[in-house]
Image (spheres, rainbow, N blue to C red):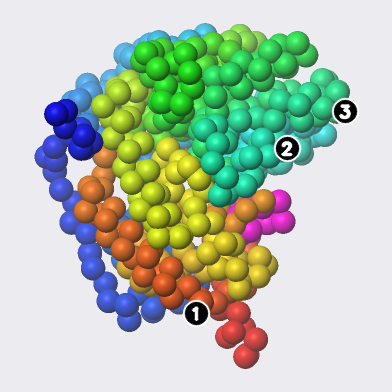
Amino acid sequence: MPVKTIIEPFRIKSVEPIRWTTRQEREQLLRAAFYNLFLLPADDVLIDLLTDSGTGAMSTRQWAAVMEGDESYAGSRSFDHFRDSIQEIFGYKRVIPTHQGRAAERILFNVACKKGDVVPNNTHFDTTRANVEYVGAEAVDLVIPEGRQPSLKHPFKGNMDVAALAELIENTGRARIPLVMLTVTNNSGGGQPVSMDNVRQVSALCRKHRIPLYFDACRFAENAYFIKLREPGHESKTPKQIAQEMFSYGDGCTMSAKKDGMANIGGFLCTNDDSLAQLEKDLLILTEGYPTYGGLAGRDLEAVAVGVQEALREDYLQYRIASTAYLGNHIAEQGVPIVQPPGGHAVYIDARAFLPHVPQDQFPGVALAAELYLEGGIRSVEIGRLMFGGAAKMDLVRLAIPRRVYTQSHIDYVVEVILEVWKNRERIQGLRLSHEAPYLRHFTARLEPVERAVAR
Ligand SMILES: Cc1ncc(COP(=O)(O)O)c(C=O)c1O
């Protein structure tokens, strides 16, 4: 009989201790952090599921490559490794390194967009939306209607609504749409994949109107694996072949290598447009660095060059997708409302359904995230009203799984804590804002329990 258990496809060579705190300590820590888990010291977190960004464990091959880093200011050999590895997968002519994804976004939108423009995306991630809006353009989310219904199961809930995109192009006019973006997988919409068929349709529409198509490629490998698992005709292809085909339908991408680049820092911007690339490099030199390092050390370029290839390994992707589904399915079986099916890098709890007694303007997602910390020292993040303000379509709590970091027993612990909170959900109260910044307010916002705010 073939063995069915999917195991971590690695063994552990170096360990990092984690620290327990008491509930009483966590109550104090939470108050000191103004109920915003971004403001907690990481040492006071037991299981950190705040993000899968830059929090992964690098492999022995990546660490070996780090030692090969060429730190030359210009013409570094490490840049050649970086560019060649990326081009093999992504296929774009120009590869511009940046220190992380948002730097690629800032450069792209500064160069390609102007005030009054409109940028459609399946769902903009927060930094993507902020960078579009910063240049005075409008960020429009056009995910399919199924993608907005958390409990509904659909294999490709990250798909773009092609009819809505056609209508937007018709009404806005091609001249005001400098590019269309597809986020693979769709992080803010629940880590849900985009199908190859949808990529083809969006690409055909963009080509018809001569609008460039860009990928927000952060989780391209996970998206490729979902296509292999769920889309007929792709079963026998490798994740790399699928990724190559997907990118062939576009004109460029932004990428945070802190996700499927398997690195702790890094990113890049790709394009097939030479004149755009020139403008992008001019801006890069002003703010990031020379085009053969773009704000990264040579060793970081080496880590990414190896990492993007490792992210496409089938044994890794099988374990990755299975372990996320394990967490999602175990809590969903007990009634916890989650975005279905579980995403690639994260499980998203539907906080509005979890806490129906907490009004939306009292941040149910932030309140639930705070309770998970109180109960078990778990750090998660709200993706909802605090992050997106009135534009939020859902209030989700994201439990993002760092790559190659936690074992099955850590995940079993997380399941137990969530189920305990689920049992006592009625006593969780809402929060209100006491301080907010003008941009990306969720990173620094301060909140307080509604009851206390009223009593003062
Ligand atoms: C879909 C998506 N796009 C862009 C970014 C921004 O990348 P970075 O954090 O490297 O700036 C992220 C980060 O989480 C993301 O998930």
Taking the image as drawn, is residue 292 in sight?
no
Disc 2 marks a residue whose amino acid type is Val
Q: Nearer the viewer, residue 288 or 377?
A: 377
- Look at mark 1 in the image and give the residue it sits on: 427
Left or right of residue 81: residue 391: right
Q: Nearer the viewer, residue 452 or 324?
A: 324
Position of residue 450 measured from the top left corner of the image (x, y, whole percent)? 60, 79
Left or right of residue 155: residue 377: left
Disc 3 marks a residue whose amino acid type is Asn
Circles 3, 2 touching at the beta carbon (< 8 Å): no
Sooner in the amino-acid sequence: mark 2 or mark 1: 2
Left or right of residue 253: residue 313: left
Q: Nearer the viewer, residue 418 or 337?
A: 337
The majority secondary structure of the magenta stretch comes to helix
The magenta span reads 384-392
- Look at mark 3 in the image and give the residue it sits on: 171
Disc 1 marks a residue whose amino acid type is Arg
For mark 3, give the secondary structure.
helix
Q: Give the distance between the C-alpha atoms of the residues marked 2 and 1, in whole angstroms.
A: 37 Å
Q: Quadrant of the C terminus?
A: bottom right
